[in-house]
Amino acid sequence: MTRTIEVVHSTNKKPKPNADNIAFGKYFSDHMFVMDYSEEKGWYDPRIVPYAPITLEPSAMIFHYGQTVFEGLKAYRTPDDRILLFRPEKNFRRLNLSSERISIPAIDEELALVALKKLIEVEKEWVPALEGNSLYIRPFIIATEPNINLTPANSYQFMMILSPVGSYYKEGIKPVGIYVEDEYTRAVKGGTGTAKTAGNYAAAYKAQERATEKGYSQVLWLDGVEKKFIEEVGSMNVFFKVNGEVITPELNGSILEGVTRMSIIELLKDWGVPVIERRISLEEIYQAYDRGELEEAFGTGTAAVISPVGELNWGQRNMVINNREMGELSRKLYDTLTGIQTGKIEDRYNWTVEV
Amino acid sequence: MTRTIEVVHSTNKKPKPNADNIAFGKYFSDHMFVMDYSEEKGWYDPRIVPYAPITLEPSAMIFHYGQTVFEGLKAYRTPDDRILLFRPEKNFRRLNLSSERISIPAIDEELALVALKKLIEVEKEWVPALEGNSLYIRPFIIATEPNINLTPANSYQFMMILSPVGSYYKEGIKPVGIYVEDEYTRAVKGGTGTAKTAGNYAAAYKAQERATEKGYSQVLWLDGVEKKFIEEVGSMNVFFKVNGEVITPELNGSILEGVTRMSIIELLKDWGVPVIERRISLEEIYQAYDRGELEEAFGTGTAAVISPVGELNWGQRNMVINNREMGELSRKLYDTLTGIQTGKIEDRYNWTVEV
């Protein structure tokens, strides 16, 4: 890595939000990482600069044709005051896979990691110390070319911004109610479901609105083809424990490959718990429930790590899972993963990267 | 309409591009229309102002979750120097339908039309006089709230920008070669295919790249479920003339309802030409071809109006349609529609709106 990353320090430091009650996504630190792309230069001018607005032409392609990808990961402060990232190389890998799907040029993943570490170093005071809090990292790329011709852009900007976030479980972990969405579709094979790209997210709001109206926390997405097979829960991957075995939908071309998902599968394998990635029909889950074999269900993602499912509603059919309590395996996975992330448990997997 | 639209005139007029050779989407006029939305005020402050960059926080929702919709229509200069819009109310209607799908608040369609007419009036010198040229109009809405929480935004901006464009057919109408895309999917029922939203467009670049590599102009999209039924061609609707009857895919929940499509159906009905909207399999088209009954095929959209298909390629199967010549009906539809749009033919349908 010979490229130098210029740092321009902010002279106008913002106050930090109250650690006890930080609303997600509203506060941003004093600096950000920026790198530009042009056809002539490739990715150039990687730099850390004061957090500031972006100025774009109204014709900038991001506003018209949706060429944009993003990632989400966190920096955690350990009890002995070190700062850890959790498998950040997986996020930059996925960012490039997302980019490939919508014709955005790949970034140098190693450079991105070096840049992120440097950014966090500059912003180390923004990594919260309070248990459960963390510094959320949002890398993203936007097409900036001012041109409304329908073609991949020839200029882009890659940015990383940082947002301190509170605990996802301020009042303890409470299993959530999930509503099975059978009208709206999140993604389909051949579409963009495997890419973390903006269009997938706005498309999910209508279904979420309906779930909220009906008193549920999230939707369970079925496949877009037969509307029979389980894909994701909200913006999380999903796991079920049935008769001692853990199952999760296979990476079928429409599911996002979560870093938490990947880590859970690796943990379970290491623990000798049977875990299988395969196609799972909703009917199968209901049958397991009727037989009394559905032991646990949980969503997985960067924000919640593990989000236990206490209820699953599909029209007239309703399941209450594990008496609406967090299951033993869900708890063990949560404690282990968050323990490793925050440096409270030894990281035998080399997942964490110290800043 | 009691709301007044403030006009701030530009003091710095740009030169107009050379009318003989205008690249699509690169030139923009001196003014634009802007209107803001907040939860408290609703849509407010409609105004025509000098064309200028947009400044947004890096956390603005448009950059992360894709809440954005757009439209495309044109203003034409008639031989007797009037300026006409073609069914603009249909575009604003569709803009609101698109917005509804991704949880953007509706605009006042009447106000939008008043604003557009006023904007074109201010920019009347930007409506090209050269035959075939026109002024492309791009209305669009973006989510502006600075917040990366995954939820619909509470602030938006609606804009209309204007771009002079050259003739789509500078060298005469030449039927194009189309490649059947059977891996990538444009849209699926329950997704966002019926909405004109950014995410749908970047998602189509990979397929277009492949078509280009193989020497074809556009892709033909199949349905995302069975990969058997015809949906669209590139970003156009598609029609086939089989044994004297015109068929086009029905509005099935994944196809965009084109204003040109709608107008063609109305014209054909008025002319007494049988026209049917229904599910159409690709296999059926190949069989009609083999029987010698496939007479014409064409895409329809605002840019090209009619784009005749001269060749359709599906792996080993290839069809050359009407000897790669523009069909008689395609020609009549093109001449009639462009004639009405440019005021050369009497508008018996009340489709045009004079500025």
Image (cartoon, coloured by chain):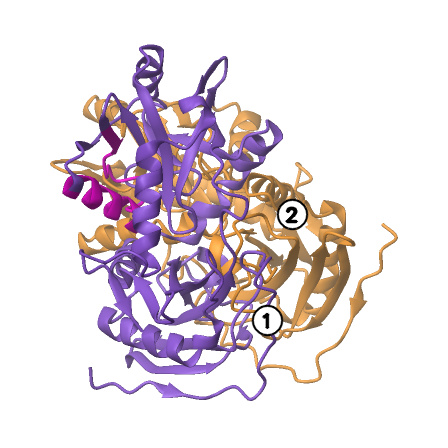
Chain colours: A orange, B purple
Q: What is the secondary structure assignment of the residue under circle 2?
A: helix
Q: How far is disc 2 from disc 1 in space, using C-alphas?
A: 25 Å
In-image side of A319 versus A348 (left or right): left
Q: Is residue B93 visible?
A: yes
Residue found at the very far right of the displayed protein: A2
From the viewer's perspective, is residue B275 above or below residue B258? above
Circle 1 Cα neighbour tier, 10 Å, few/some/many (<14 / 14–19 / ≥20):
few
Residue B30: percent from the left, percent from the top? Answer: 52, 78
Q: Which residues are magenta?
A: B246-270
Instruction: State the residue in front, A267 or A91.
Output: A91
Residue at image position (33%, 66%) is B84
From the viewer's perspective, is residue B304 above or below residue A77? above
Residue found at the very far left of the displayed protein: A316
**For the residue marked with disc 2, what is the amino acid?**
Pro
Residue B270: percent from the left, percent from the top? Answer: 15, 43
Disc 1: which residue? A54
In-image side of B93 versus B158 (left or right): left
Disc 2: which residue? A88
Residue A81: percent from the left, percent from the top? Answer: 68, 62
Dots 2, 1 in contact, CB < 8 A: no
Residue found at the very far top of the displayed protein: B291
The chain letter for the residue carrying disc 2 is A
Q: What is the secondary structure assignment of the residue under circle 1?
A: strand
**Quadrant showing the C terminus of chain B:** bottom left
From the viewer's perspective, is residue A32 above or below residue B334? below
* Of the two numbered discs 2 and 1 in the rendering, the one whose residue sits closer to the viewer: 1
